Image (cartoon, rainbow, N blue to C red):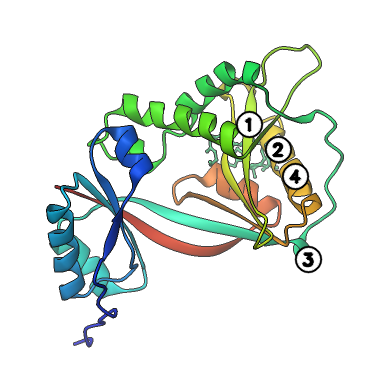
Amino acid sequence: MEPEINPPPRAIPAEVLDWDSQFFGFKVGRAFDHRLSRESAASLLAWGRLNGLRCLYLSADPTCPQTLHLAHVAQFKFVDLKLDFEIRRSEMRPPPEQASFKKVTDRDLPALARIARESHLETRFFMDSNFPSIRAADLYEAWIRRDHAQHHVFSISDSTGSPPMNYITCQLDRDALEGRIGLLAVANEARGRGLGQALVQAALDWFWKQGCHCVRVATQGANVAAQRLYQKEGFRTASALLQYHRWF
Ligand SMILES: CC(C)(COP(=O)(O)OP(=O)(O)OC[C@H]1O[C@@H](n2cnc3c(N)ncnc32)[C@H](O)[C@@H]1OP(=O)(O)O)[C@@H](O)C(=O)NCCC(=O)NCCS
């Protein structure tokens, strides 16, 4: 029998997520550790109850059988496989020029919000039916609006002046000189014509010009189209985590 792995006990095993809690209208939290012991699983559940959580997120290490077993026993619901990809500047191919890659404006937001509502159906908020699907769609609309307010949202437009049919959101950590792609989508009717690839290439070019040495992006294990797109641009898998929700 495998010896039990005991992550060092934490006085506080999780945190309340204010943005998620406010958005969904009930308390949502996130476990700090990726591995569970019997003690830490029990303390997570006790902490969740004590703090009045409705939903607790757990990102679990898929290589730890004990964690998977204890997550099952503690009634955590599997909702996604999260893959994190990264590319380093040294691995980068020079991108082609994208003259029509521009920061979006307030006027573009309604069109982008529509695309956001329809484009992220493979994510854990749609997969977990405990979240009403209307709220999951609202979440992605709120997300694109938040990224527009707090980060950098770009799109590639055509020459007709019609609203953009695509977006990519870019977050910059100026201290660590690292970038992160948040959301990427092309409207259903415009897919398969190279726009997704052009967005990723132009975003990478933008990140390198900001001085980043590394760019990361996360996607779902089931999202083969996105994985192939990132792999085509030179991204490589950096980590894989199983996503669980524990409902109280
Ligand atoms: C992923 C997405 C952005 C791709 O946009 P797109 O404009 O259709 O993609 P492109 O035409 O530029 O294709 C580029 C590459 O992506 C991959 N790809 C795109 N669509 C694919 C599909 N349906 N199946 C498999 N691979 C696909 C391929 O590797 C393709 O290159 P290839 O045609 O030479 O094989 C688009 O499908 C989308 O918006 N999906 C919903 C939102 C989403 O999943 N976002 C990513 C995670 S946040």
- The quarter of the picture where residue 234 lies is bottom right
Q: x, y (%) of residue 80?
A: 36, 50
Residue tagged 4? 201
| Residue drawn at (74%, 23%) of the image | 157
Q: Nearer the viewer, mark 4 or mark 1?
A: 1
Tag 3 and tag 1, C-beta contact below 8 Å: no
Residue tagged 2? 199
Find residue 202 and name its label.
none
Tell me the distance, in whole angstroms, between the alpha carbons under discs 1 and 2. Answer: 7 Å
Q: Is residue 184 left or right of residue 234?
A: left
User: Which of the two labelled residues, at mark 3 and mark 1, occupies the earlier sequence position?
Assistant: 3
| Residue drawn at (24%, 43%) of the image | 27
Q: Is residue 175 left or right of residue 39?
A: right
Quick check: can you spot residue 191? no
| Residue drawn at (77%, 19%) of the image | 158
User: Which of the two labelled residues, at mark 4 and mark 1, occupies the earlier sequence position?
Assistant: 1
Amino acid under disc 4: Gln
User: Which of the two labelled residues, at mark 3 and mark 4, occupies the earlier sequence position?
Assistant: 3
Tell me the distance, in whole angstroms, between the alpha carbons under discs 3 and 1. Answer: 26 Å
Find residue 167 and name its label.
1
Tag 4 and tag 2, C-beta contact below 8 Å: yes
Image: 4 above or below 10: below
Query: How many neighbours does mark 3 have within 10 angstroms: few (below 14), some (14-19), or many (20 or more)?
Result: few
- Secondary structure found at label 4: helix
Tag 1 and tag 2, C-beta contact below 8 Å: yes
Q: Is residue 208 left or right of residue 230?
A: right
Amino acid under disc 3: Ser
Amino acid under disc 1: Tyr
- Secondary structure found at label 3: helix
Tell me the distance, in whole angstroms, between the alpha carbons under discs 2 and 3. Answer: 20 Å
